[in-house]
Image: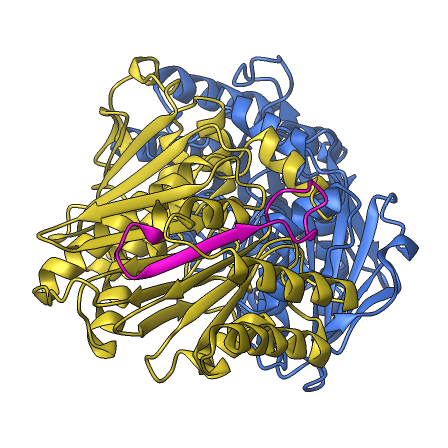
Chain colours: A yellow, B blue
Amino acid sequence: MSVTAAQGFEAAGVVAGLKSTGNKDVAVVVNRGPLKVGAAVFTSNRAKANPILWSQQAVSDGVVEAVVLNSGGANCFTGSFGFQTTHQTAEKAAELLDVSAGDILVCSTGLIGTGDEVFRGKVLAGTTAAIAGLGPDGGDAASEAIMTTDTQPKRAVVSRHGWTIGGMAKGAGMLAPGLATMLVVITTDAVLDAGEADRALRTATHLTFDRLDSDGCMSTNDQVTLLASGATGIHPDHSAFTMALTEVCQDLAQQLQADAEGASHNISIQVVHAASDEEAVAVGRSVARNNLFKAAIFGNDPNWGRVLAAIGTTDARFDPYDVDVWFNGVRVCTAGGPDRPREEVDLTPRATGILIDLKVGDAEATILTNDLTHDYVHENSAYSS
Amino acid sequence: MSVTAAQGFEAAGVVAGLKSTGNKDVAVVVNRGPLKVGAAVFTSNRAKANPILWSQQAVSDGVVEAVVLNSGGANCFTGSFGFQTTHQTAEKAAELLDVSAGDILVCSTGLIGTGDEVFRGKVLAGTTAAIAGLGPDGGDAASEAIMTTDTQPKRAVVSRHGWTIGGMAKGAGMLAPGLATMLVVITTDAVLDAGEADRALRTATHLTFDRLDSDGCMSTNDQVTLLASGATGIHPDHSAFTMALTEVCQDLAQQLQADAEGASHNISIQVVHAASDEEAVAVGRSVARNNLFKAAIFGNDPNWGRVLAAIGTTDARFDPYDVDVWFNGVRVCTAGGPDRPREEVDLTPRATGILIDLKVGDAEATILTNDLTHDYVHENSAYSS
C-alpha cells in the first residue's frame, strides 16, 4: 500500500517510456486533504538537481498538494531548459489537479545530465497519464515507478491509535548522508501543522536515513517528503508521532541497505560509550566509508586493524589503546590489542554487526552500510544509460 | 641505487623469515656522515603503530644514525610487548653500529596486530644480519626488503651540481593523505642542518605524497624519512634543494600510484582556478575518494555527473552552474551542463587526466588517485596474512 495506506491519499505509477526496460517510470502522489500539510528534507550536496531547486521553494510555505516523481533521468546539470522542464511538470500537474503549481513538488532520479526535449515530453505525458489513473490503491504502482537499479520496491506502513503512516522509497546507489540519500514519500492521515511535520521529519531522518551510508557518495537529487492529510481528525502527541515516523523511516532505510547495489553484507556499525552523539556518528561513518574495511567484510575477514585505522582518522575523543571491537558478537580486539582469534568469527551471514566501544562517554549511534564487492564495481562501472 | 646513490650511506636488505614468500623483509640504511642530520614526517592517523611512536621521539633532536625497516608485520596494536620490540630493535642496531639507540628510527609494515615473540625474534635477527651485510651498493636490496604487495621496488635519484638525492618507497595499499601514506627513506650527500632538512621535507611531501590518494585509507604506520650525510661538503641553496627533493618525492609518488593494488588507471585530477590551494586540494580529493567516479573510470565511462556530485560535497567556493570538466582533453561538461559527447573520450589508456575548472580564482592543485576495480576488491578482501 505504501503511500496510499493512510486515508486521504491517491497515487499512480505509469509507463512513460523513460526507462529502456519499459517498466513504470512516472509516479504521482496526491493529498486529497482536508489538510494539505507538507515538509521535506533535501540533499545537502551543493550541486543540486533542478527538481531539488524547485521543490525547496515549493515546500517552503508548508503546503503541498501533490508530488510528481520520475525515474529514468535525474534532470540535473541540464541547464535552464532542465529547470523549465521541472517547472512545466509542476504546471501540468497543477492544471490537471486544479491547484497551484507552487504546491506541487517534483522529484527525479537517474543519470545526471539527462533532460532533453524527449525527456521533457515523456515526463509531461507521464504526469498526465498518472493523474488520469490516480486511485486509493495506487501506492504499490507508485513505489514501482520510482525504482532505478532497485531490485524491489520499498514500502513501509505503521499504524497507531487510529492514524497511519505509510511510505515508499527508492535507493540502490549513491547512498550517503547529509540527507537525504534517495527519493522517499511518506504520507499520514494524522492531523499535523506544518511546523510539527517539519520537526518530526527532521528528527526522524536525522536518526535513520542520515545514518545510512552505503557507499559514501551523496547524490544531487535526494529528497524525503512528508505529506499529512489530517483525514482521521486525530492530532497525535508529537513525540508519539515522531517515534512512529522514525519507525517508518528506519524500516525504509533498512530496505535500502538490504538492496544496495552489489552488496553482499548489511553491516550495522554500533558505536557505544562515545563522548557525544556527533562523535559516535563520525566514528561509525569513518569505518563505514573505509574501502579496506568494506572489502575485508566482503571477504569474510574480521580485520579489526582496519577498524582502528579508520577510527584514528577522526577527531572523536578516544584512546587508541583503550578501544574494544566486536565482529558478530566476538571481541576480536580489546584495549587496542588482539583478543579472541579471528577464526571464531563467522562472517558468512548477510547481517553483520560491528560493535565499537570507545570507553569515553555515554553517547552511541549506529551507522548502516554495505560491503565493497565485485558486483558493486561491476554495476557502477557499467551504469551510465 | 636508491638510498645509496648519495655519498655517505650504506644499506642492506635481507631475508629474516617474516614474509611467507621467503623474500627479503628487513632493511637497514646507515648514515656514515660526516653529518648525521635526519628529519621525518609521520602518518596523521591517531592510531599509530609502535615504530611511529618510537621514531617520532627519536627524530625530534634532528640526529639520525640509521633506519631499520621491516615488512611482514606492522607491529601496530600489539601493546607494550610490541613497543618493547621496537625499542629492542633500536637497541640492537645501536649496539652493532656503536651509536645511541635514540638515533635509530624504526619502520614496520604489514598486517596490524602482528607482533608476537616469533616476530620479534625474526626482526632482531634480521637487523643483525642486515647490519653485517651493509654496503655502499645495498640500496637496491633495501628497496626490495620493504615491499609488501608492491609488484616492484620504487627508487628515484636526482643529481644537481655536485650533490645527489636518492630514495626508496613502498606503497601498494592504504595510500592516502594526511601524510605519509607509505614507507619512504630518502638520503642526500648535501650539507643541511636539521631545520633545513625538516622544512624541505615538509614542503616536498605536502606537494607530492600528501596529494596521492589512491583509496582514501590512511595507514597507521606511514613514515617518510630524510637523511643528510653532508659527504660532498656542498651546502645547496634551500629552494634548489627543496625543488630537487620535491622531484624525488613526486617520482616516488607516481611509482606508488602506478603500482597501487589492483588499479587499472592512474588518474591525475587537476583542479584549476580555485579560490585557494586548500580548496583546490579539497575538490580534487573529494573526486578522488568518490567510489562511483572511481568505478566509472574502471569502466572507461567519462561520467562527469559523478565529478560534479563529488565537488558539491565540499565547502570550496564554486558555482555548480559554472564549472567545466575535461576527461582526457575532451570537455564533456561546460557551465554545469553537457558539452562534447562522451563517445569522443578515450579512457582506455592507463594514464587518465581529469581537468576541473572552477572559474573562481588562481589556485590549482593536482591529486593523484586510482580507479576502483575488481582486482582492488579481490586483493583487499583476501589480504590478511
Counting from the top left corner in percent of width and height, residue A55 is at: 48, 75
Left or right: A39 as drawn, with respect to B382: left
Residue A237, located in which quarter of the rendered image? bottom left
* Image quarter of the N terminus of chain B: top right
Residue B108, can we see it? no
Counting from the top left corner in percent of width and height, residue B347 is at: 85, 48
Residue A236, magenta (yes or no): no
Q: Does A301 appear above or below A168?
A: above
Q: Does B204 appear above or below B7?
A: below
Main SS category, magenta section: loop
State the residue lying farthest toward the right: B344
Residue nearer the viewer, B82 or A319: A319
Q: Which residues are magenta?
A: A4-24
Q: How many numbered discs?
A: 0
Residue A23, magenta (yes or no): yes
Left or right: B71 as drawn, with respect to A255: right
Counting from the top left corner in percent of width and height, residue A247 is at: 22, 49
Q: Does B202 appear above or below A334?
A: below
Residue nearer the viewer, A135 or A84: A135
Counting from the top left corner in percent of width and height, residue A242 is at: 17, 60
Residue nearer the viewer, A355 or B194: A355
Residue A188, located in which quarter of the rendered image? bottom left
Left or right: B24 as drawn, with respect to A363: right
Q: Residue at x 60, y 31 (%)?
A: A375
Q: Residue at x 68, y 48 (%)?
A: A19
Residue A271, can we see it? yes
Q: Residue at x 69, y 44 (%)?
A: A383
